[in-house]
Amino acid sequence: MSKTRTALTPRPAVQKMAPYSPPTGGRAGKLRLDFNENTVGCSPRVIEFLRERLTAEALPVYPEYVEAMSELSAFFGVATNEFLLTNGTDEAIQVMINTYVDDGDDVLLLHPSYAMYRFYAELAGGEVRQLAYRPADLSFPLEELLAAVRPGTRAILIANPNNPTGTGIDLAGIRRILEAAPNAAVLIDEAYFEFCDTTALGLIREYPNLFVSRTFSKVYGMAAMRCGCLFSCEENVRWMHKAQSPYSVNMLAALAARAAVRDGKYVANYVKEVLAARELACDGLKRLGIPHYPSQANFVLFHAGDRAIPIRDALREKGVLIRDRSYEIAGCVRVTIGTRVQIERFLTELEKLWTA
Ligand SMILES: Cc1ncc(COP(=O)(O)O)c(C=O)c1O
């Protein structure tokens, strides 16, 4: 007789977690306007650098980060002990939470925002409270957030500009949060910084509760590499270093990051193209009478009402991927902004569907 096998019971925190399953396949060959990636590719100099360095002798060796740390510190204008190299922003969030958030700790998030904040906060056993972006225009709820901070609040995670709303908070607002929550680790996730130019990075020496993250997944076109940086004051970085796995960033990612920051011209050109394409997208949506929210990033959230999911599905049939967000803001769909040519294709297909 066969024994009944029962799986092990996971920690209560894991049992309680909200599921998060982004689509992970079937995107090849389509116009990828669904994940806020770079829609063109990384700088050719990154590929050249990797080709030069990818040798049979390089792969058996555990990664060394000295050169990457030194070059990235010069690029970002911080000391090498004021940041961690991370396996994407995801690891930055995880390391910060694992360093500061314990079971039952109060964690403040905004809604809707990047799903991985809640994911790691819940995984760590934190008690998550979420405040809504202002319904009228999805602007940042600063006064509401300041009022919600408690003396025991342990972490506050903010994307600036925010995904998927595209709206942001200015430095004066960030300073008010940092001052109102001296006991909380405040993360300003600047994944889309290059499209808006507001950064809190210059404040890390002034506020010991400030953490800033950057990624190579967006403007740099290297999402597959999984590479990012987490900045904070020296002492925080020392603690977080202790809580980070020593080789979480692979050698190719560290090499790619070095080459990427050397090609500033590539990034500047891509940003310029995206900003022009964003204007085109907003004008096109307006022409079709489709309401949208103003964006400071490489995506635009628009209101397709009860046609959100049908429009997303019909565009997919035409080879154009966009992301439904109606499960968090009723009727809303998000389109990533690529080049003007790509956005023209999106608008042409959308117009056919919208006016049919
Ligand atoms: C606000 C925000 N932060 C971080 C990321 C992802 O970063 P990474 O690929 O560096 O983990 C995303 C991706 O969509 C995002 O929207």
Image (spheres, rainbow, N blue to C red):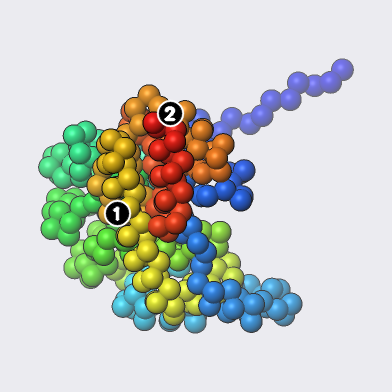
How crowded is the residue under tag 2: few (<14 C-alpha within 10 Å), some, or many (20+)?
A: few
State the image coordinates of residue 121 (x, y, percent, origin top left). Answer: 39, 43
Q: Nearer the viewer, residue 185 or 104?
A: 185
Q: Residue at x 56, y 36 (%)?
A: 317
Residue 48 spot, x, y in % from top left: 59, 78
Q: CA distance from mark 1 to mark 2?
A: 24 Å
- Quarter containing the N terminus: top right
Q: Which x, y percent locates residue 70? A: 43, 81
Within 10 angstroms of label 1, few (less than 14), some, or many (20 or more) residues?
A: some
The type of residue carrying mark 2 is Ala
Residue that badge 2 annotates: 356
Asked if residue 72 can be seen in this view, the reply is no
Q: Which mark is residue 328?
A: none
Compared with 142, 186 (above or below) is below
Q: Residue at x 32, y 45 (%)?
A: 284
Q: Which residue does the image show at 38% across and 24% down from the upper left?
A: 306
Q: Secondary structure at mark 1?
A: helix
Q: Is residue 319 left or right of residue 17?
A: right
- In the rendered image of this protein, does residue 158 appear above or below residue 8? below
Residue 163 in view, yes or no: yes
Three-letter code for the amino acid on which mark 1 is drawn: Glu
Judged left or right of residue 316, residue 149 is: left
Element carrying mark 2: loop
State whether residue 322 is above or below residue 91: above
Residue 327 relative to residue 54: left or right: left
Q: Which is nearer the eye, 3 or 262?
A: 262
Residue 341 percent location from the top left of the image: 44, 56
Question: Looking at the rendered structure, which numbered label has been put on residue 279?
Answer: 1
Q: Quadrant of residue 138?
A: top left
